[in-house]
Amino acid sequence: MSKAVVREYVTRFNRGDSEGLRDLFQEHAQVHDETGWLELDQVIPIWEQAIDRLGVDLDVEHIIAEEDAIALLYTERGWSRASYLGRPATGRSYELPAVDWFVIEEGRIVRQWRVRDRASQARQLGWDESLPAPSSTASIA
């Protein structure tokens, strides 16, 4: 069942279904990325921008599950079609491997850690790597 939740996460992410994504997470779930811990109300708008402005698409390579922990290896692809988090649109595409780690409780995601090579993405898209990444003041409960 836990693998099914993660597969559905990928499906809804690729569709740009923000409300559907929200339904897969527990109310106080948190997502960790390179900026730190984010609440859903903080991360969903970032995901919406990524889907809309970078055309992000996730292609599952492997899903590994043990008890309530799920590891997802995927290829992320997209192209810069509008400015994103202070970075200009370049019209260039990117592709990178990424890993997410999920903890599932009662059939819903309670924690997600996202690991992506932002430096590779920046190089491929022609972004100035010295631009700051978005910051967060969220902390894990």
Image (tube, rainbow, N blue to C red):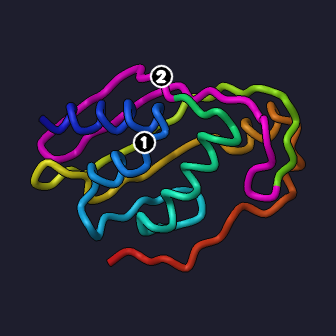
> What residue is shown at x 72% (from left), y 61% (from top)?
133
Residue at coordinates 78% horizontally, 35% vertically from top-left? 81
**Residue behind mark 2:** 59
- Looking at the picture, tell me which residue is in the foreground, 96 or 1: 1
Q: Mark 2 touching mark 1, by CB under 8 A?
A: no
| Local secondary structure at mark 2 | strand
**Label disc, if present, on residue 1 of the rendered structure:** none
Horizontal relation, residue 76 to residue 130: left or right: left
Label 2 packing within 10 angstroms: few (<14), some (14-19), many (20+):
some
Q: Give the residue displayed 31% in from the left and 58% down from the top.
A: 111
Residue ID for mark 1: 17
Measured in 3D between alpha carbons, the distance from the residue under mark 2 to the one under mark 1, in whole angstroms, is 16 Å
Among the two numbered marks 2 and 1 on one chain, the one whose residue lies closer to the N terminus: 1
* Span colored in magenta: 58-86
Q: Give the structural element (helix, strand or loop) at label 1.
A: loop
Which image quarter is the C terminus in? bottom left
Quadrant (top left/top right/bottom left/bottom right) for the N terminus? top left
Give x and y (percent) for residue 92: 83, 28
Q: Amino acid under label 1? A: Asp
Q: Which amino acid does label 2 sit on?
A: Asp
The one nearer the camera, 71 or 5, is 5
Is 123 magenta? The answer is: no
